[in-house]
Image (cartoon, grey):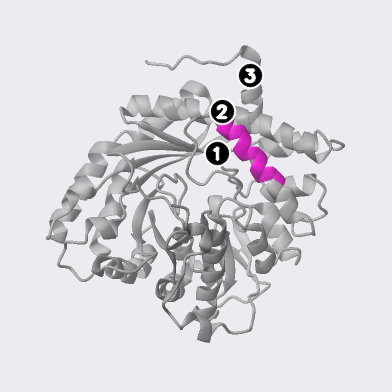
Amino acid sequence: MWIMPLPYAPEEILETVRMVELENLDIRTITLGISLRDCADSNIKTVGKKIYEKIVRTAGNLVEVGEELERTYGIPIINKRVAVTPVSLVAESCDEEDYYGLAEVLEEAAQEIGVNFIGGYAALVHKGFTAGDLKLIKSIPRALSQTERVCAAVNVGTTKAGINMEAVMMMGEVIRETAELSAERDGLGCAKLVVFCNAPEDNPFMAGAFHGVGEPECALNVGVSGPGVILSVVRNHPDADLGTLATLIKQTAFKITRMGELIGRAASARLNVPFGVVDLSLAPTPAIGDSVADILEAMGLERCGAPGRTAALAILNDAVKKGGAMASSYVGGLSGAFIPVSEDAGMARAAAEGALSIEKLEAMTCICSVGLDMIVIPGDTPVETIAAIIADEAAIGMVNKKTTGVRIIPAPGKVPGDYVEFGGLLGRAPVMAVSRYSAARFVRRGGRIPAPLQALTN
């Protein structure tokens, strides 16, 4: 059996073992990106056949390779995933009015190869729609409510193009419909849908992963995680000043990222595909001690959501990026700290106690990796309010030249104070209140919000 030589000293290996056993260190995902651009055809059944065969041929042993690497290196790899070219691009030439059949094909392929999720049921509409974009967006509610592994993403804005407000309004309606079609599971279909501004093409994390048009035929991207490791470092230095603490976090992020690159390059070699990027995000789980919120509280906040939360998150996010960038020449994806409410036990606790509101979370998204993530809201929230939340978050991304996203779940029949249980890595969360004031007249104006002045960089 081929084994990549380890560039680590024995004490580093022992330290990594301790991180795995005691601090929830893991590889959150290895995601194989696959181009489907050669699968286009005017007949949707032919497209589906080509897609299925290419995914199975290219990623057929992805899960097996991941499991081999877990045994070889003793590092848990939690998810094995596939991301494909945005389906709206691949299906554009089809005569069909509904692309749902391709969502079924993706589901069947994902089941066949055994991956956890498959991303790329996506459309890029930041400057406007094609006929294929509209067909795909229309089919998202059915696709997400009737499949288990298919994930969708729609990019509605960029710093260069501005924000497509007609797309924003449309996605408010899509989110509500998706929630209603998966009402028996508290709107769980929405957990597989991200609305982006400045979506990255090499993101290995679901639900927003897709294989961008600038990517090679295929590429292996890795998402590392380690909130528990960072939490341990912060707790072990209660009297360190903030500059010293940032340095300690940076040094730890360096070690985590080196481990991620080792696994990623080993996986790419065994799969005989190019190595893509390491996404060095702190991705929390509902497990105790694996929480970004707990890190912020260990830094000195009584509760995540207290004044100082954005400054603390800025220290954390910056140190993680600096440490990771020194450990790998190929850092990409989202890279930073995630703040999903349901997937982070500390965030969920802070939201339930009233320390965190959607508005406070929105302020933190100016700093974090993505945006408003895994937030549960009342099921009767107007579509205009959902659209306005998306617009606010997209504006933060557009103006700050960063990726922002919204993964929000209107839970049918639920009101503020209720709890929703998703289970597994998706966790549980309180239903959070939204503003009762309407933005309907604003979001229904349509048109495109112009790109900001900082977009004129050429």
Instruction: Give the answer, above or below, for where 332 lies relative to 363.
Output: above
Q: Is residue 403 shown in magenta?
A: no
Which tag, 1 or 2, sits closer to the chain's start? Answer: 1
- Residue type pointed to by label 1: Leu
- Residue type pointed to by label 2: Ala
- Residue type pointed to by label 3: Glu
Taken as a whole, is the magenta stretch helix, strand or loop? helix
> In the image, is 1 to the left or to the right of 431?
left
Asked whether 99 or 86 is in front, the reply is 86
Frontmost of labels 1 and 3 is 1
Q: Give the extent of the magenta segment.
A: 315-327
Q: Which residue is mark 1?
A: 280
Mark 3 neighbour class, 10 Å CA radius: few under 14, some 14 to 19, many 20 or more: few
Badge 1 vs badge 2, beta-carbon distance below 8 Å: yes
SS label for mark 1 = loop
Q: Which residue is mark 3?
A: 12
Mark 1 neighbour class, 10 Å CA radius: few under 14, some 14 to 19, many 20 or more: many
Asked whether 184 or 219 is in front, the reply is 219
Q: Which residue is mark 2?
A: 327
